[in-house]
Amino acid sequence: MASIINSIYILKRTIYGTAKFNMTKWRRGFYIDRSCFRTFYRSKAHVISGNELAKDIRKEVQKDVESWLSLGNKRPHLSVILVGDNPASLTYVKNKIKAATTVGISSEVILKPSHVSQEELLEVISKLSKDSNVSGLLVQLPLPEHINERDICNAIAPEKDVDGFHLVNIGRLCLDQSSIIPATAAAVWEIIRRTGIKTFGKNVVVAGRSKNVGMPISMLLHTDGRHERPGGIPKLITADMVKEGAAIIDVGINHIEDSVTGKTILVGDVDFEGVQEKAGYITPVPGGVGPMTVAMLLKNTLMAAKKIIY
């Protein structure tokens, strides 16, 4: 009761300006009382920890894998094809393999040089798609310019397409039918769902319309979750673009030089410090959508092994 009374007292003091108090971690906002706008102060946006949410999902997947194996089923297996030696792609693949191991999913990486022909790559995909020991298959993007990305994604068997990029999975998603959802889009939706953010009847802005991220996210939000790759722009979304109390989920990945240390750091497409002062919820970069994307990939792999969709 004391804390409630204290909160009311602080609010009253703020409204009528009868006293000064520490405003370090508080900000100005508005509420309506008898058709009048009055001023109040509240804390910064709640920072959503993708790391913590992903940890929960990995535990759930691990438990599900153990249950699946206890029934005498084959261990889920993930095959990843990596073309070339792109440093970022190497890191992503290592993270996926490491995460798969922690939840009991076996995995392998098939390395191909950057000069591999599209025909050879298609042959490898065809072989793995037909292999009964392979539950999930993905080709790490981006690919060299001489390889048609869409042809490669469509060559993977839809039921093993754990990235969710095959035209069948994308088409089913757009028609609000059960499908394997692209991992990053699934990560965004899972963040929204587990955080309790309400989207039904709300206005939602998706900045970016890439076929692999922006469009699938739009489709998920369009149906309220029932069911070409642009470059990111550091600090594209600033506080003046954001509605008071909005939920901000940053999918951007940008490597920039820190002006103080001179080191390369990872940031998103949102001006985190500025927007945090105005938003209700916000995800950081790193530690937001990234780990959740890997977690949802593992979940997709298990779904593929259990043949839940197909």
Image (cartoon, rainbow, N blue to C red):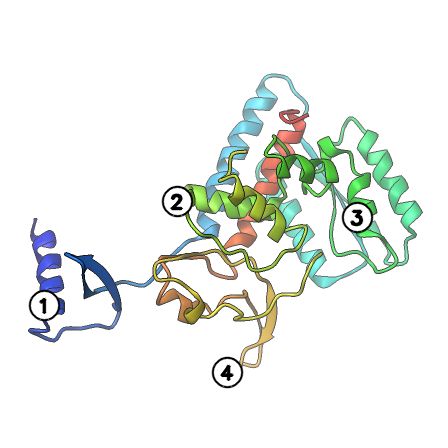
Residue 309 marker = none
Foreground: disc 1 or disc 4: 1
Q: Which tag, 4 or 2, sits closer to the chain's start? A: 2
Q: Residue at x 13, y 58 (%)?
A: 7
Q: Disc 3 and disc 2: Cα gap in Å?
A: 34 Å
Above or below, 242 against 219 in this view is below
Q: Amino acid at mark 2?
A: Lys
Q: Which tag, 1 or 3, sits closer to the chain's start? A: 1
Which residue, given by chain and number where applicable, does mark 1 sit on?
13
Q: Disc 4 and disc 2: Cα gap in Å?
A: 39 Å
Q: Is residue 152 left or right of residue 240?
A: right
Other residues around mark 4 within 10 Å, as few (<14) / some (14–19) / many (≥20): few
Q: Which tag, 4 or 3, sits closer to the chain's start? A: 3
Q: Which tag, 3 or 2, sits closer to the chain's start? A: 3
Which residue, given by chain and number where applicable, does mark 3 sit on?
150
Which residue, given by chain and number where applicable, does mark 2 sit on?
198
Q: Residue at x 66, y 65 (%)?
A: 231
Which quarter shows the C terminus?
top right
